Image (cartoon, rainbow, N blue to C red):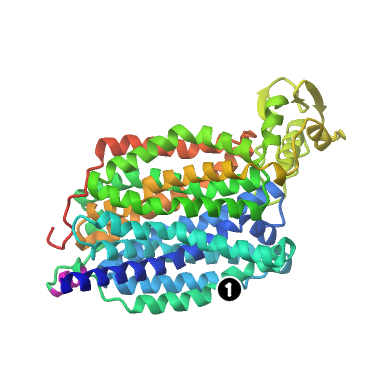
Amino acid sequence: MADTAIAAQSHRKVIIASSLGTVFEWYDFYLYGLLATIISAQFFSGVNDTTAFILALGAFAAGFAVRPFGALVFGRVGDLVGRKYTFLVTMGLMGLSTFAVGLLPSYASIGVAAPLLLVGLRLLQGLALGGEYGGAAIYVAEHAPEGKRGFYTSFIQTTATLGLFAALLVVIGLRTWMGEEAFADWGWRVPFLLSAILLGVSLWIRLQLAESPVYQAMKEEGETSKAPLSEAFGRWSNLKWVLVALLGAVAGQAVVWYTGQFYALFYLEKVLKVDGGTANILIAIALAIGTPFFLFFGWLSDRIGRKPIIMAGLALAALTYFPLFGALTTAANPALAQAQARAPVTVFADPGSCSVQFDPIGKTQFDKTGCDIAKSALAKAGVPYTNESGDYGIAAVIAIGDRRIPIEPGSATDLAAATADAGYPAKADPTRINKPLVVAILTALVLLVTMVYGPIAALLVELFSARIRYTAMSLPYHIGNGWFGGFLPTIAFAMVAATGDIYAGLWYPIGVAVLTLVVGLLFLPETFRRSIGHRD
């Protein structure tokens, strides 16, 4: 009885220490995403608004781009040296690079050097995160008793959302305390600078832990891998499971995660014109409601398996994204939804005269053709539109409901007035936002996240042998979440900018979710009854 109590106490310490440290890393990593709109103005102010936001999202994605390389570097170290010391190093690297973001001069101060330095720090963050997650998940799983790995590792799965939630609370608190103007001017730096305090606390907590018992046993018996990279990826018997893990589980999980928690936030702010403070609060409430379901689905996966829960989450996401985001538009900005229904906007133009509304160097002037003038004005006003081809030369015609407006280079047409007359709002009216319904829709999106993400740490740990576990599971996880997921906001908003359709960006997560569902159903094994000891 006493031994059981001591073991339970030890397990709680492992979970709490591992989870708190990982929450800190996610807090650091996601601060940038929450402040993307402000950062686009601070560091990318030399280009037009649409391009600046896409570039800011691109810098956000840069941190995700290098995560697989961090997984290779730190995964190898974790299999060679140990789980504990590896994620101590990654935590220090993350904390210092995050603190430095709060000290960076803006574009107005040092020009193009500002975004370059910002991207450099995002790359360091991405490398650190590439080594953190695998270490924490493995460390907890290798301490967990048989039959409870899904539940124990689901605490690690809450850390990404809790880190986002913590960042939201800090941002909301500062915005409320100092006001939007001061926060946008300099207050946005404070959440980054606070990471120095959190780093010290998290490192102290992690230093109290001992090495994983599975790794310690391997080390004592001389059975650790001497070449984890070649063993994990140079042998087909291991490599095939890396590919199955990526394409049959993680890629779909990643796009559902980033759609439900980040794209939804960006969609509220950038497309539906809900003010940043309100959007942050609504997302925070949904996260608070949905987060316990990570634990529920982790617990459930110990009873019915990991695979059916993940596959069900992917299928539901693919089927419900369009209706959920349509309902979100109606609930958050009813004037926009009504204007779309009453007076849809169509750009009639020669396709050859139309450019993609994206200018990465800030030199392109979208005023050479009527099509470009029309689309640029509509994008700046946040008015969704569809495209129809026609033989108009360099001219174009905009249809706003029954009204036809010819657009030619050099013409002086006030499209802002025309769209306003048709009922298209410049911003979402705070008094008309159906906040309970918005929270309900956002919570539904978060619940889909919990289904696909809650059981996946246990699944990945169980897929690979202990000798190469850190290396082998970290790479597919970070390719999936770093590339498939991390690039989602950038890709989705570029699709919206290119088409004028505010829902066009959803085709990307739906397509990846369907692909993963098919591969997973065909090739992903069920793992929840497997043992994960070093001799298994």
Q: Nearer the viewer, residue 327 or 44?
A: 327
Q: Is residue 274 left or right of residue 128?
A: right
423 or 479, nearer to the observer: 423
Q: Position of residue 106 (x, y in %)?
A: 68, 66
Percent position of residue 482, x then y = 44, 53
| Viewer-nearest residue: 65 or 252 | 252
Tag count in the figure? 1
Q: Is residue 350 visible?
A: no
Please give left or right for residue 9 compared with residue 359 in the image: left
Left or right side of 413 for 254? left
Give the percent coordinates (x, y) of residue 334.
67, 36
| Residue count near mark 1 (Cα–Cα under 10 Å), binned few <14, some 14–19, many ≥20 | some
Which residue bears the numbered disc 1? 193
Range covered by the magenta-colored residues: 215-220
Q: Residue at x 62, y 38 (%)?
A: 331
Predominant secondary structure, magenta span: helix
The residue under the point 29% across, 69% down is: 83
Quadrant where the N terminus lies? bottom left
Q: Is residue 218 magenta?
A: yes
Q: Is residue 419 visible?
A: yes
Quadrant in which the C terminus appears: bottom left
Would residue 54 be counted in the magenta stretch?
no
As drawn, 267 above or below 19: above
Q: Amino acid at mark 1?
A: Leu
Percent of width and height locating residue 48: 72, 49
In the displayed orientation, state which residue is furthest to the front: 1
- Foreground of the two, 146 or 340: 146
Q: Residue 332's image quarter?
A: top right
Tag 1's secondary structure? helix
